[in-house]
Image (tube, rainbow, N blue to C red):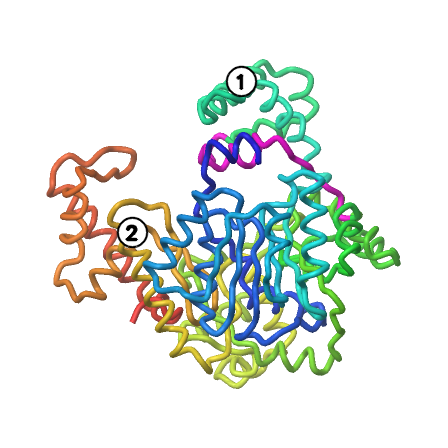
Amino acid sequence: MTNAEANTGYTHDFYRELTPTLQRFALLLRGIEAGGDAQRFKYCELGCGHGFSSLLLAAAHPDSEFHANDILPGHIGYARKLAREAGTTNAHFYDDSFEEFGNRTLPDFDVIALHGVYSWISEENRRHIVDFIARRLKVGGVVYISYNCHPGWATLSPLRDLMMIFSGNPADPLLPRVDHALTQIQKLLDTDGAFVQANPSVKNRFEEILRQPRSYVAHEYFTDDWTAFHHTDVAGELREAKLEYGTTVHILDHLAAFSLTPVQQKLLGNTANADQREVLNDFIVNRQFRRDLYTKGGQPIDIAERNERVTNTRFVLTTMPADISRTLKTTLGSYSVNPAVFDPLIDAFKKGPRSIRQLQQELGIRDMSAAMILETIIILIAGNHLQPCLDAAGEAARSKRTAAFNTAIMLRAHTGDELAFLASPVTGGGFHISRFEQLFLLARERKHADPPALVLECLKARNEGLKHDGKVLQTPEENLAHLRERHADFLRRLPLLQQLGIAA
């Protein structure tokens, strides 16, 4: 266990790449069969932190079984307590090391997931993980893994080394040491030395680090073990568990024309070795973080069947239409979407989840090809404006479980904002909901006549005040007026929450 882990808890975020529906869709785009039933599967998360992602997914997949480990007892205690509050009984948590977890009596899994783990553990622990996957992943199963990669870390790696050099005595509290190290590095960068001149992007990258929560910075940069890999490094290690690279969950990469020039596409197309092709791609786009899916005996899908499945997949909006940018930023620059395709699709999705087949049948869209629609859908998913859905069958049962889970999260919003995602029975994943939106939802669920006034009473009971435009609101009247503005924004988003099955 690292010093950072021993002193500081990890964040409570939900990472959508862990969502089985998104993983299955990414594999489908590549024409690869994902193992297991879409709604009944066994899922394992290695290094689960506070267990929030696994709990949310378990609530959204009540017929599936989830197992997760983290070496910190405080993290596992948190996960088990939240599971009891939410009535989530199909998620199981263990305060085990990777070696201990591998020695438990566990089922074989359809999915094994590691988000933000592989780059931050020792070589020995990586061996334990590979051994676990080799023994516990079903044939046809899927592994999701993310990690820091080259060449995107070429500039930041020396700064990370400096963080450890300036981190002080490991026996002292961690967060003050983090602040001291960051202050020293800022002073160094302010001198505009030769390193900064040769790497002009380093200042902006460091400013991004300074804006991140200190607990996240501690786990990201101040661990005893830290490695940035080439794709070939990780692919080679996972091959020992009989895994082969499937595809990326970075959905925009499925549209090569948006990230690669014709010359670059030709280079990759002429590279027969798949591992070398991925490394070349990483250098072309200067990738810093990989989000990959590997399969154990994954089977190719016939192109006609693949197209049929894609055409019948439902998708749902996760962003208000007015808030969706018509400009896409890519490694090649900005790309403006075709309004003749984009706008009718958005108008259709306003009505609720739709498949490509349904979209083609609707007025104003029937003349569009499936390929044109799919390209726009991929762009929307890449921007986190759209998500693939579970089948409509079983949604009522899922809704009961996600409602219980979401209520438990909303009740915690009375005392803080650490949990900022609710579960959707439609997508099977998480959706970002701010603390005040959660309280408004809770008030609506309980049919309170004046939700802003209820939230104000909650704040007053804890001597909390609001800020607006960087200023602390002084009077109850100012606080209530601001809450009414936020409630109006919430009501504007309510139809979206209803489509996602989060609000009734």
Please state the horizontal and vertical placement of residue 33, each as a whole percent of the image. Answer: 69, 73
In which quadrant of the rendered view does residue 394 lie? bottom left
Image spot of residue 428 (x, y percent): 47, 68
Res 204 seen here: no
Mark 2 Cα shell of 10 Å, populated few (<14), some (14-19), many (≥20)? some
The percent position of residue 381, horizontal first and vertical second, equals 55, 62
Magenta residues?
210-231
Queried whether the magenta region covers residue 270, the answer comes back as no
User: Which of the 4 image quadrants contains residue 149?
Assistant: top right
- Image quarter where the C terminus lies is bottom left
Q: Nearer the viewer, residue 461 or 465?
A: 461
Above or below, comparing residue 2 to residue 99 in the picture: above
Residue in front for this viewpoint, 124 or 416: 124
**Mark 1 or 2: the one toward you:** 1
- Kindly identify which numbered label has been placed on residue 169: 1
Identify the mark at residue 412; answer none if there is no mark: 2
Badge 1: residue crowd in 10 Å (few <14, some 14–19, many ≥20):
few
Q: Which mark is residue 74?
A: none
